[in-house]
């Protein structure tokens, strides 16, 4: 059995994802997390969740 991970999303990840055009949904909810994961899957089909740390850091540390 294969499990699919969903990229965790918070306000910082959502803000950066919207600026990068990865997320269109306004609400930060489960559906947004699924949408973001789908967009990230275009970059890496095997491990789309690996981008979570980078998106979070852009929103927090570097004030993207």
Image: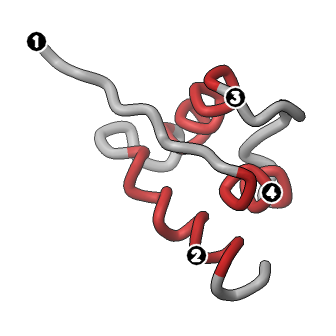
Residue for badge 4:
15
- The quadrant of the picture occupied by the N terminus is top left
Earlier-in-chain disc, 1 versus 2: 1
Apparent side of residue 43 relative to residue 9 in the rendered image (left or right): left
Secondary element at image label 3: loop
Q: Which secondary structure lies at badge 4?
A: helix
- How many labels were placed on the picture? 4
Which sits earlier in the primary sequence, circle 1 or circle 3?
1
Instruction: Give whichever of discs 4 and 2 has the lower sequence position.
Output: 4
Mark 2 or mark 3, earlier in chain: 3
Mark 2 vs mark 3, CA separation in Å: 20 Å
Camera-side mark, 1 or 4: 4
| x then y, percent, for residue 51 | 47, 58
Q: Earlier in the sequence, mark 4 or mark 3?
A: 4
SS at circle 1: loop
Foreground label between 4 and 3: 3
Q: Are marks 1 and 2 in contact (CB under 8 Å)?
A: no
Residue lying at the far bottom in this picture: please name it: 62
Dot 2 falls on a residue whose secondary structure is: helix
Q: Could you give the CA–CA distance between mark 1 and mark 4, rounded to whole angstroms?
A: 34 Å
Q: Which residue is mark 3?
A: 29
The residue tagged 1 is 1
Label 4 CA crowd tier, 10 Å (few <14, some 14–19, many 20+): many
Whether label 1 touches label 3, CB < 8 Å: no
What's the mark number on residue 57? Answer: 2
């Amino acid at each position: 059995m294969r499990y699919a991970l969903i990229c965790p999303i918070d306000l910082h990840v959502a803000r950066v994802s919207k600026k990068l055009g990865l997320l269109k949904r306004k609400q930060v909810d489960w559906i947004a997390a699924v949408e973001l994961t789908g967009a990230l899957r275009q970059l890496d089909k095997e491990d789309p969740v690996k981008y979570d740390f980078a998106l979070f850091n852009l929103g927090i540390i570097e004030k993207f």
